[in-house]
Amino acid sequence: MLRHEFQPGRLVAGTALLATAVIYGGDAGGAWETPWFVVIPLVVGGLCLAGAVGVVTGQVRRRVRPAPEGADAAGHARNPGG
């Protein structure tokens, strides 16, 4: 059982920031050379992609579902007695 709701936008943002950290960690450790400006497209692109994923996820979760039998358009139960 899940303890919280799955949020793919946060997963994408975390992955992009983790990739940035790994790239700069490799540079700091001397494994490779990374120019300072590499962080800009990684972080900005990752956050934009995460925002788009979050919007799509929100739209999918809020899509209109048919109301249950005996309910009004807002999904509230009708009170026939008044």
Image: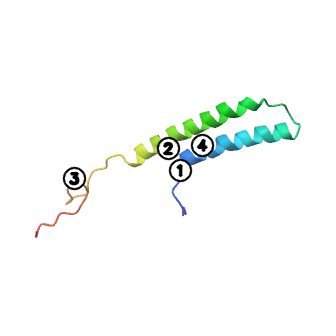
Mark 3 and mark 2: Cα distance apart in space = 27 Å
Task: Check disc 3 and report the residue beneath it.
Answer: 73
Quarter of the image with the N terminus in it: bottom right
Q: Secondary structure under badge 4?
A: helix
> Percent position (x, y) of residue 11?
60, 47
Q: Secondary structure under badge 3?
A: loop
Question: Which of the two discs, 2 and 4, labels the residue nearer the N terminus?
Answer: 4
Name the kind of residue labelled 3 in the image: Ala
Mark 1–mark 2 contact, CB under 8 Å?
Answer: yes
The residue shown at (67%, 32%) is 40
Mark 1 and mark 2: Cα distance apart in space = 8 Å
Mark 2–mark 4 contact, CB under 8 Å?
Answer: no
Q: Residues within 10 Å of mark 3 (few under 14, many from 20)?
A: few
Q: Where on the picture, by quarter, is residue 17?
A: top right
Horizontal side of 53 relative to 46 (left or right) equals left
Instruction: Say if 64 sits above or below 45 in the image.
Output: below
The residue shown at (24%, 54%) is 74
Task: Check disc 2 and report the residue beneath it.
Answer: 54
Task: Check disc 1 and report the residue beneath it.
Answer: 7
Task: Check disc 4 and report the residue beneath it.
Answer: 12
Name the kind of residue labelled 2 in the image: Gly
Instruction: Say if 62 sits above or below 81 in the image.
Output: above
